Amino acid sequence: MLDDQGLCSGCLIHEEKDNLDWAPRWEKLTQLVAPYRSTDGRNYDCIVPVTGAQDSYYIIYMVKERLGLNPLLVTYNKYFNTPLGIRNLSNLRIRFNCDILCQNVNPVSVKNITRSTLLQFGSMYWPILAGQTVFPVQTAVRYKVPLIIWGAHQGLEQVGMFSHEHEVEMTRRYRKDHDLMGHEADDLLSIFDTLKEEDVWQYRYPDDRDLNAVGVKGIYLGNYVRWDPKAQHEQMMREYGYKTSVFNRTFDCYDFVDCFNYMDLHDQLKLYKHGYSKVTDHVSREIRFGRISREKGLRLIRKHEQAPLKYHGQFCAWLGIAPKSLQFMLDQHRNPKFWIQTEVGKWEFNGWSARHELREISDHQAPGLSGSFEATDTLEYDRSAEYITIGKGWP
Amino acid sequence: MGNHASVVHSLRELNYRVRVSNDQAVLNEADVLVLPGVGAFPSGMKALHSLSLVSYLQEQARLQRPIIGFCLGMQLLADASYEHQYTTGLGLIPGEVVPLINPQWHIGWNSIECVLQDPLFQASDGQVFYFNHSFAYRGPSEYQIGLSRHHKAFPSVVRRGSVVGLQFHPEKSQRPGKELLKSLISGLCHA
Amino acid sequence: MLKKRLIGTVIVKNGWAVQSFGYRRYLPLGKPECLVQNLDRWGADEIFVLSIDRSSGRLGPDFKLLGRLGQLGLGTPLIYGGGIRSVEDGLQVIRLGADRLCVDALLHDDVEIVRGLSRQLGAQAVIASLPLSYRDQRIEWLDYRTKVSTQVSAKDLDAVTLGIVSELLVIDWQHEGQPGGFDRRLSAHASLPAEIPLIAFGGLSEPGQLIELLSQPRMAAVAVGNFLSYREHAIQKIKTQLIGMPMRLPSYESMYSLTTDV
């Protein structure tokens, strides 16, 4: 969103990273968490949602090593787990020596929801987004551990919805509006006659009275620490053995190594629906951090945006649909603003990265930056590319 | 005029089946007739006349069908109103509708006081509801179940037999509104 | 007793709910209907949806948005402002489910239309929005479309409001979005028609400030916007800080409790 000077909110808010004085902000954070420390050591100080990727290592490092809190880790089984992600998660709790709780929602319900939301919204990620954002809150209520500590606030980092100084906290409204694309668990029941209450109740947000009775409060470290995912991941790779992987569809090797689909099929859907994909988000971030130029960024986008999928076969097998049916479903969600069907099965892309006035920037070669993100492993890790639907056999 | 969505939604949330209609055949099927309403009295009556619902509603009241009016819907139950010009109403509850004076309107959340014993409203005594009006009912005290006070007291709940009028908007009064509707409808239906 | 109100405000620009700062900087928040539904669940006393680009763009009221809000089946009264050009526009806004409407540009353009709205709907349904600023002990009234502020007298304001509207929304537009920024000299100013109750908006966030404003007899309500999006249960938390004021108590909805002892 642009202001009356034509400045984009995402860039404006990003500038705060270099303009704010972070030392007093850290002080604020330590004061904020102080009352939540368990005095008798009989309960956890806070809950921290984790996965085998993204910022989990850095968040735990901050919470445990820097703030000295005793967290209960919670993780939601997303089913599309990569061996590397399972390994990273396992290594995380060993290296930081933490207790962890895992939520496994039954496969029948997860597949029912995935099938319905894929068909209707063009989203295969609803159960994962819903599960990752609700299980920590349910755990806070059930275990009576009111403080939940998240990493960066996505709305702040990408779009600039809030200033760091607003010190925005976790809300049900944001989750519904953005994480869940406007549809909470019970909304699905009125949209789909294919779903029943027994399929979705696990994804219900705790009600207001419960949240208030326990005093649940979710905070974001990114409001108090200068958040830089690349630098943070590299520190975690060096110091705590976080492992990374190369991706076809982006140059960032760090963010989504725990999932076969996020940077694959899910990313393609994003391109179909919105006319840009994750690589554009990554490029915008790196441009804002001043690590790459606009031109280099555009080359990277051109290189990765249309890269072929690698793991959609596994998804078809998991959901029990034929690849052709999947493609048919996906095509229903191509946004006509960005895609023109030229003949049966052939589509022409018309997103912003393909715009004519940008063409003079050549699309051969995308050198430079890809080397500065380091892939230390592969998603498959020590085995073949198959979902690890539950983390059996890992230490 | 007015929007029925909120009324329909709040009644459905209470697990009632709701239909919006001006067709007497449909209305005949219902256990309770609800007359919501926003706007001015004369145009409200004009609409009821043009839909041939005036004599229908009068007949239904004689048959002791439960009828509930909200806000303007309540005022329409009276004999007449002075809003804009003197206009006769449905005449289901004796009394007239007169302008509020000093201040000329009553907007916001206010409590009701039950001044006559009525089991349908006892649980709502002292609860707070949303009002938005500049005219109010004036009539015999035997029909005044509940009062509200702005600068002066005025009747906010009226009842004559199976006909009930609420000056406030229960459908816009959050939980207290829903609780009152539930008690009111189940009470009228099982009377 | 009539309660004073805490109004949850949703500013809409280009179809999106936004945070607005000083009438010139905006940060996107999300879908207006998500914010409105949330304020309804939190138990705001009234919800105010203000589409700020409808009049300047000559687009008329955002009927599509009103239609979507109508579908929510709100249990909370709704005020709509933005783009109302005629009596027919105002009637349609009410038909689509708003309980009251708020006019701003129309007060500059054609007060007879506002008078017409008031005659058709009753003055209780009409609110006048006045973006004001304070200079040299006088108040200035902003036409937000031209960004021009003009000094106004009591007579000027009487002419566009007395007997026409039921409440004045006094906006400190310069301090909008600034914590504790509202300039109380605006709402206390002698140029405001004394007979009409006030709603204060713009830079309202601090409990002490809210208590002071709500203690003024003519202050019927306070409206809060940006600050409601920063934390969970923002409405209830503000109300908890205002206990003792003549207001409805905070309430927390319960549908599916996870805890057996609730």
Image (spheres, coloured by chain):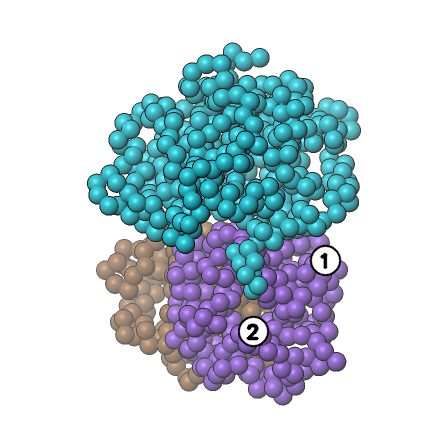
Query: What is the total number of numbered labels drawn onto the structure image?
Result: 2
Dividing the image into 4 quarters, which one contains the C terminus of chain A? top right
Which residue sits at x=35%, y=49%? A350
Instruction: Tell me the number on the disc at residue B62.
Output: none
- Tell me, by letter, which chain the rendering colours cyan: A
Which residue sits at x=50%, y=46%? A295
Q: Nearer the viewer, residue C159 or B115?
A: C159
The amino acid pointed to by label 2 is: Tyr
Which residue reaches farthest bottom?
A: C155
* Left or right of B150, for residue A322: left
Q: Is residue B168 above or below residue C126?
A: above
Position in image of residue A28 (x %, y %) = 76, 43
* Left or right of C165, for residue C85: left
Disc 2 is placed on an element classified as: loop
Position in image of residue B76 (x %, y %) = 40, 72
Position in image of residue A342 (x %, y %) = 24, 45
Q: Nearer the viewer, residue B160 or B170?
A: B170
Which residue sits at x=67%, y=66%? C175
- Rendering colour (chain B): brown
The amino acid pointed to by label 1 is: Pro
Residue B84 location, quadrant = bottom left
Residue that mark 2 sits on: C144
Residue that mark 1 sits on: C207
